[in-house]
Image: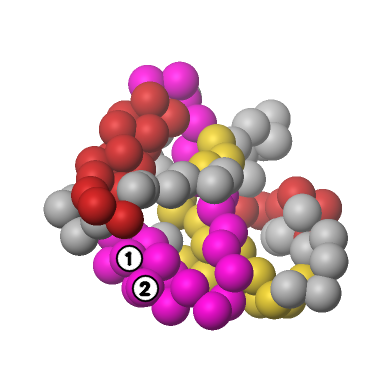
Amino acid sequence: MYNELDRTLFQSDGRFLEIFQLWVHPDYRRAGLATQLKSKLEEEAQYHNVNLIYTHTEAVNDHVIELNKKIGYQEVRRGPIWDDIIRVSLIKQLNVSN
């Protein structure tokens, strides 16, 4: 996936944080937990001077895509990755001090 995205999105050493399979149990959804988890990961990324977070989800997960966009992620790719399922790749660029 890294090779399919515009390299100028990444910092010069190529480091980034990937959020993969973040899942909240149905009994605890709509309580802001996913947003809180992502916020904490953003703090960790900034602490380690990582300026980009990457995530993806299946295109049918409109609520996940909407949540990501609401908290500052932008769609950078839509299509299959390793199978025929259409996935949406999103990134969030962070301000870090190098």
In front: mark 2 or mark 1? 2
Which residue corresponds to the image point at 31% horizontal and 39% vertical from the top-left? 37
Q: Which mark is residue 63?
A: 2
Q: Mark 1 and mark 2 in contact (Cβ < 8 Å)?
A: yes
In which quarter of the view is residue 13 placed? Answer: top right
Magenta span includes 71: yes
- The type of residue carrying mark 1 is Leu
> Dot 1: few (<14), some (14–19), or many (≥20) neighbours within 10 Å?
few
Secondary structure under the numbered disc 2 in the rendered image: helix
Seen from the viewer's position, the closer of residues 2 and 33 is 33
Can residue 57 be seen in this snapshot? yes
Q: Is residue 40 left or right of residue 12?
A: left
In which quarter of the view is residue 44 placed? Answer: top left
Pointer 1 residue: 67
Q: Which mark is residue 59?
A: none
Q: Percent x, y for residue 47?
A: 37, 21
> Furthest residue to the left?
31
Part of the protein shown in magenta:
47-72
The N terminus lies in quadrant: bottom right
Q: CA distance from mark 2 to mark 1?
A: 6 Å
